[in-house]
Structures are given as structure tokens and as C-alpha cells.
Image (spheres, rainbow, N blue to C red):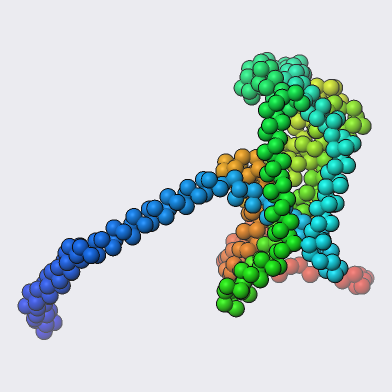
Amino acid sequence: MAAASDSVLAMASDTSSSPHVASDDQSSAGQTARAVKSTVMDPQLLRRVGIAVIAVVVALKILFWLFDGTRHFLFLLLLAWLFAIAMEPAVGWLARKDMRRGYATGLVLVSLFVVIAAFFAVFGALLLEQVVSLVQALPEALVSLVDWVNRTFNTDFDPNQITDSLAITPEQVGKWASTLGLGIFGFFTSLVGVVFDFFIVLLFAFYFSAEGPRVRRLVASWLPQESQRLVNNVWEVAVQKTGGYVASRLILAVLSAVITSVFLLIIDVPYWLPLGIWTGVVSQFIPTLGTYLGGALPALFAFSNSVLDGVLVIVFVVVYQQVENYFLSPRVSNRTMNIHPGVAFGAVVVGAALAGALGALIAIPIVASIQSLVETYGRRYDLIPELAMDAEHPLAERAEIRATGSAREPAAEPDSNSTDEG
């Protein structure tokens, strides 16, 4: 009874105090409403807000206009930066040998020019001729491959339908071949723009490489010392990891192109030089699917030559991929970072969607730089036992660990020095 009376008194007191609480809430709400009304009706404040909104909109319009007008130039700067960090291993090695960075950068660039000029002096005409012939022979090779598949596996694929679906019609191929030929005026006019862009990339790549430390000091001088240390570490990690990644991909691409071209020449596959270069570039700069895409085109022309050549090309691609994975790549890329195939493939897709083929090529170096920064400055935590044991114990032991709270002790190995008695 006492408890009941207490509860009744408490309810009465709450009821008696509720009007005061409600009145307080109403008064605070009224004050808030009056403050908002006075703020909204203030002409000076409205004028400031309107001016701020207009200024933000105008600034965004100007930024978008500037970006749209300089997008190509910014892309060239990005290529120059990637080219500079690709040269950084060689330039840094020469700089550590007491050579000035400007001279070291110039020596590396001249060496690259000599190698490229020697290649085109020896194989330039042959390469262009084989590329034009390869593009013209592509429909015929595809038809031959489809006919062989129909005869071998008793199928009824229509080669004309396949070529039409892939847009490899004779008319389209004729356009490709005329574009690649030497007698097209448009090709030479566009070549002027390509050469101009090439020299822009070289100029800024030389500046980024030779003046890199000075630019870093200039940027750091505008920051406090704590931020200077961060900028210095970020700069070094990005250049080291990304430069090593790009350099290793280039080395592996050259090795793959040379070895593939020599193999195709030995087994007498037509268009061996452009097919070898295609395989080397695609296999290294397109992750996951690059090896298969790179080897598919040589296999196609090899099958059009003979079934044995096609089988030999497929076997060579598979064997070379294993040799590269277990022997060449670990030695060339031992100082670079590994990128998850899924992340790399997604980066290539996004880069191709944003900037075409060049965007696909530079997407992985950019992701490598971002990943290096995340791994350097990101924080990781220790795994809980349930997650840690997934990688350390087989599936059969996990239920026992969860039930007992401890792992099963491994069986003791028999003592090799003991002897059986009796």
C-alpha cells in the first residue's frame, strides 16, 4: 500500500510540473523561431549569403572552364611526372656517384634516345610494313581460325557474323590500314601534334627529374617543420615505389617483347615483330588478363599459319608466363610493390574510361603511388584470434579451437636417435 501511494504521489507531482515544462519548451521554441525569423529577414545577412553563393558558383565555373581548357596539358604533365619517376632509379644511381642531377638526367635521356633510334633504324621500316600487313590480314586470319574450329570440333560458327560483331569488316580494316600507311596526309598532320606533345613531355620530365629535390625544398619552405617532414616522406615513398614499379614493368615488357619476337621468328609466324611488341606491352601493363590478351593475337595468326604453330605459341605463352612469375619478375621487381590483381584491373578499367588507352597505361602507376602512401601512413591493428587462426589453422581445427579455446598441439616427431628395444 505504501508503494502504491508513493507511485500515485509521484504521478501527481509529474502532472503538476508538466505545465511548467511545457511552457518552458514553448518559450524556447518561440525564441528559436524569433531568432531564425530575425536572421532571415536581415537584409545585410541575406546580401552576404547571396554574394557568397554567387562567388562560389562563379569560382566553380572558372575552375571547370580552366580544367576543360588545360585538360590535355595537365595530362601531358602527368605523363611527364611518370616518365621522370621511371627514370629516377637510373638518375638516382648516377647522382649517388657524385654526378649532378642535371647531367645524370640528360645522360639517361640521351641513352634512351640512342636505344630507340637504333631500334627504329634497324626495324622501323619492317615494323611499319608488318603492322599495315597485319591489320589487313586480320579478317582473313580470323576466318581461317573459325573454319579450323568448325572442322575440328564439328561446330557451325559463321565467320562473317563474328567479324561483323567485332567490327572487323573489310571496309573498317581498309580505314585502319590507310591510317597506318605512309601516303595519308592526315597521318602526317597529326604527327606534328604528336611530336609537339612528345617534346613537352620530355621537357617537363627533364625538369621534374633534374630539379626534383629543388622543387621539393621549395614546396617544403612554405610549410612548418612538422609538415615538411611529412611532405618529404610522402615524396620519397611515392617516387621510390612508383618509379620502381614503372621501371620494372618497362624492363619486363622489353624482355617479353624481345623473347616473344625471337620465338615467333624462329617458328616462322608472320608479322613476328609487331606481334612480339604487342605481347610485351599488353602482358605487362594490363593486369590479370594481359597475358592472355597479349598471347591471343600471336596465337590467332599462328593458327592461321598452321595448327602446330598455334599450339606451339600457346605452349610458349604458358611456359614463359611461369618463368616470368617465378624467375624474372621476383628479380626485377624485388624492390617494388605488389598490387592486388583486382585493384590493378579496376584501375585499368577506370583509367580507360577516363582517358582511353593512355589512361589505362598510367592508371596502375597512379594506384601504386596511392597504395604506397596508404601502406606507409595507414594504421593497421592486430587481428582478433578468430580471424588470425583462419590463416594459421586448417578448417577442421577451427571448430575445436572455438570449443576449447586453444589450438591442438602438433604431434611430436619421433626421435631419430632412439632405437627399438627388444
Whole-percent x, y for residue 415 in the image: 87, 71
Q: Is residue 359 found left or right of 19 in the rendered image?
A: right
Residue that protrudes farthest toward the bottom in the picture = 2
Q: Is residue 90 found left or right of 84 in the rendered image?
A: right
> Looking at the image, which residue is at 59% across and 67% down?
378
Whole-percent x, y for residue 174 in the image: 70, 19
Task: Tally the numbered discs.
Answer: 0
- Quarter of the picture holding the C terminus: bottom right
Whole-percent x, y for residue 254 in the image: 82, 45
* In front of the other: 367 or 320: 367
Whole-percent x, y for residue 362 in the image: 66, 48
> Looking at the image, which residue is at 11% across and 80% down?
10
Tell me if residue 207 can be seen. yes
* In front of the other: 377 or 417: 377
Q: Is residue 323 found left or right of 202 in the rendered image?
A: right
> Looking at the image, which residue is at 65% across and 58% down?
369
Q: Is residue 226 above or below residue 266?
A: below
Tell me if residue 299 can be seen. no
Quadrant for residue 179, please give it.
top right
> Looking at the image, which residue is at 83% across and 49% down?
112
* In front of the other: 32 or 212: 212
- Quarter of the picture holding the N terminus: bottom left
